[in-house]
Image (cartoon, rainbow, N blue to C red):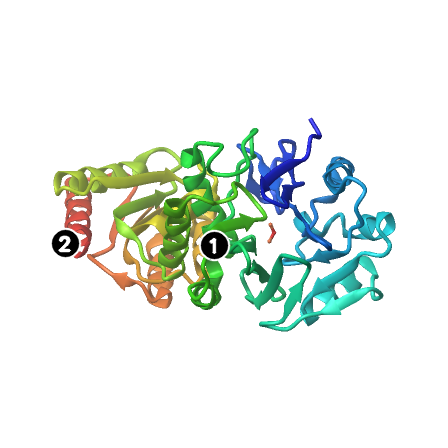
């Protein structure tokens, strides 16, 4: 079980799987778990790239010891300080007191703040290099992907990038580590959910990071979550996906996200969807926001260019889960969406007013006339929904 896993010559996988946690960062569901990846490069000097969540430190240290096989651990390179990766840092320093901790100035400030470690650290700047024998490391600062200290380390000899969270996915590694050892099909949707919810606010910093990577010959991407990408086609695919998502470019499809207490508002969503389908729109995703965790709704909003939101009025406000969705959209500086909306009320309308305020502040292209329904759908309501669907379809 603890047999060292050499994923490339001199490079060992010493990460762990988490099939226990329900919620990543305390709020993102993990139905397929998640891996915390850590890598050991063995050369004249031995270098560890990131650690793992403290809950898994015991198994991590056993793997590390096996992989070192008696050699000294010389360096720990920290590409990202979020505790799902730095959590075992304090214990690592106790177990390997001579390990030199490498990070940029912001990293080392966090190392001090989180773990009280100030000695035995080396600050690197963008473009600095470190030779560890046959392998040479070059550090690229990539701030705000998705924390201020985030950086990537490029191994120049073989073309390996240790990318931190970038290109990572939810989902455990069930045996295979590299994309040559597994079927990556199950990871793509979870890569988008990871990106859109966790990194999604930072499109511009991601674009800057991609520009830096664009100058490199990449043969392997070692992210801190999910598979190691080694197949050229997959490397191209993950980079293209990040490029598209960070430009907020959606495919030709429509997300209809709605709240509904007794099904009346849902009927409006159904009428819009049916008309869109009749007009040839094939990718239509309806999300009942009371039922579907919002991380999946956000994922699909990143995937598709069309967005329609519907809400009942509740306590003279938006339906609470619709309000929560709007807050998440605003929190990600979502752009480039074609937007329509609808709402309902029983005695005093507030939902459409609130959605109008959201639409006007969103920067989205507002399309069609919002439909407002009193109590239950009438023919006029359905006609309004059909007109809204037509306006959206025309713009796609
Ligand atoms: Fe996987 Fe931002 O931590």
Relative to 323, 27 lies left or right:
right
Please rate how many residues cluster around mark 1, counting C-alpha atoms within 10 Å: few if below 14, some from 14 to 19, many from 20: some
Q: Which residue is mark 2?
A: 394
Q: Which mark is residue 328?
A: 1
Relative to 35, 317 lies left or right:
left
Residue occupying the point 40% across, 35% down: 185
Using the rendered view, name the quadrant where residue 225 is placed. top right
Residue occupying the point 73% across, 37% down: 63
Which percent across, then down, holds residue 123? 71, 70
Relative to 388, 83 lies left or right:
right
Which percent across, then down, holds residue 180? 46, 36
Q: Nearer the viewer, residue 210 or 303?
A: 210
Does residue 292 appear in the picture of this structure? Answer: yes
Using the rendered view, name the quadrant where residue 22 is placed. top right
> Where's the N terminus, which quadrant?
top right
| In the image, farthest residue toward the top | 1
> Where's the C terminus, which quadrant?
bottom left
């Amino acid at each position: 079980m603890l047999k060292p896993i050499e994923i490339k010559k001199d490079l060992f996988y010493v990460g762990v799987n988490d099939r226990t946690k329900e919620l990543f960062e305390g709020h993102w569901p993990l139905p397929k778990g998640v891996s915390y990846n850590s890598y050991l490069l063995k050369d004249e000097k031995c270098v560890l790239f990131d650690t793992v969540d403290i809950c898994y430190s015991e198994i991590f240290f056993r793997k590390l010891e096996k992989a070192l096989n008696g050699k000294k651990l010389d360096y720990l390179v920290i590409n990202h300080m979020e505790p799902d990766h730095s959590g075992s840092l304090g214990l690592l320093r106790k177990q390997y007191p001579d390990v030199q901790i490498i990070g940029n100035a912001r990293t080392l400030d966090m190392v001090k703040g989180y773990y009280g470690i100030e000695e035995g650290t080396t600050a690197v700047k963008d473009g600095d290099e470190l030779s560890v024998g046959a392998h040479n490391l070059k550090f690229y600062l990539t701030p705000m992907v998705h924390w201020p200290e985030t950086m990537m380390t490029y191994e120049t000899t073989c073309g390996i990038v240790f990318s931190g969270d970038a290109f990572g996915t939810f989902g455990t590694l069930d045996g295979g580590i590299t994309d040559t050892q597994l079927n990556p099909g199950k990871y793509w949707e979870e890569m988008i959910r990871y990106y859109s919810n966790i990194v999604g606010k930072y499109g511009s910093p991601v674009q800057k990071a991609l520009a830096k990577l664009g100058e490199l010959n990449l043969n392997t991407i070692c992210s801190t979550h999910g598979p190691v990408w080694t197949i050229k086609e997959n490397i191209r695919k993950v980079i293209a996906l990040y490029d598209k998502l960070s430009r907020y470019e959606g495919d030709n499809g429509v997300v209809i996200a709605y709240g509904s207490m007794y099904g009346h508002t849902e009927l409006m969503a159904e009428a819009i969807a049916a008309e869109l389908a009749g007009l040839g729109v094939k990718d239509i995703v309806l999300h009942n926001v009371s039922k579907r965790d919002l991380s999946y709704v956000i994922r699909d909003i990143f995937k598709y260019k069309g967005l329609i939101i519907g809400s009942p009025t509740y306590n003279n406000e938006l339906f609470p889960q619709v309000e929560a969705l709007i807050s998440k959209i605003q929190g990600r500086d979502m752009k480039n969406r074609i937007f329509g909306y609808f709402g309902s009320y029983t005695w005093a309308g507030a939902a459409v007013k609130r959605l109008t305020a959201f639409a006007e502040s969103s920067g989205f292209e507002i399309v069609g006339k919002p439909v407002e329904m009193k109590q239950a759908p009438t023919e006029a309501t359905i006609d309004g929904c059909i007109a809204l669907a037509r306006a959206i379809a025309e713009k796609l």
